[in-house]
Amino acid sequence: MSHVKRMEKEDKCDKLLRQFPNGIRISILAQKLEVTRSTVYDYLNSLELKGKAHYEKGIAYPKKPSIEEKPVSEFFINQFWRNLDNVRHLCASGDLTKAFYGLRSLAKTWPEMY
């Protein structure tokens, strides 16, 4: 199956899931998409990584938007990667004490995004 067709099927899977907010059996989803159950699991894994779906015990569910989830600012992402690069440089130079404290400060900033 081509990449484009896979993406189309995955989108169709996402749309079907949203039609069943209380869940749909994966076997029924496979029938509606005209693919195997293992292919549906592949689609669901991809959708789960995108935050659009989840499944358990043979039933797939659309992911409901969470009020607690907040978008990560571009500033935070840039700051995080800059700090991580500094820690990598310190590790490479052999200054493990500074690298350790750099990791601690990096870990302390992570919860601030929420």
Image: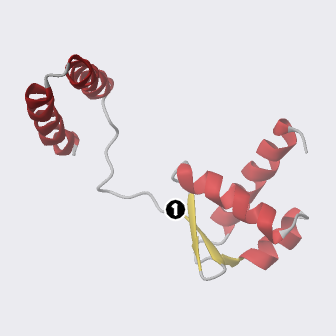
Q: Position of residue 67 (x, y in %)?
A: 32, 57
The picture quadrant where one finds residue 37 is bottom right
Q: Position of residue 50 (x, y in %)?
A: 55, 48
Viewer-closest of 14 and 99: 99
In the rendered view of the protein, which quadrant contains the N terminus?
Answer: top right
Residue 99 against residue 82 in the figure, above or below: below
User: Would you say 48 lies left or right of 68 here?
Assistant: right
Residue 111 against residue 33 in the figure, above or below: above
The image's colour scheme reads secondary structure
Question: Residue at image x 87%, y 72%?
Answer: 31
Residue 54 against residue 59 in the figure, above or below: above
Question: Residue at image x 65%, y 72%?
Answer: 20
Q: Position of residue 34 (x, y in %)?
A: 91, 64
User: Would you say 3 lies left or right of 1 here?
Assistant: left
Question: Residue at image x 80%, y 77%?
Answer: 28
Residue 39 against residue 28 in the figure, above or below: above
Viewer-closest of 47 and 16: 47
Viewer-closest of 111 and 9: 111
The picture quadrant where one finds residue 13 is bottom right
Residue under pointer 1: 63
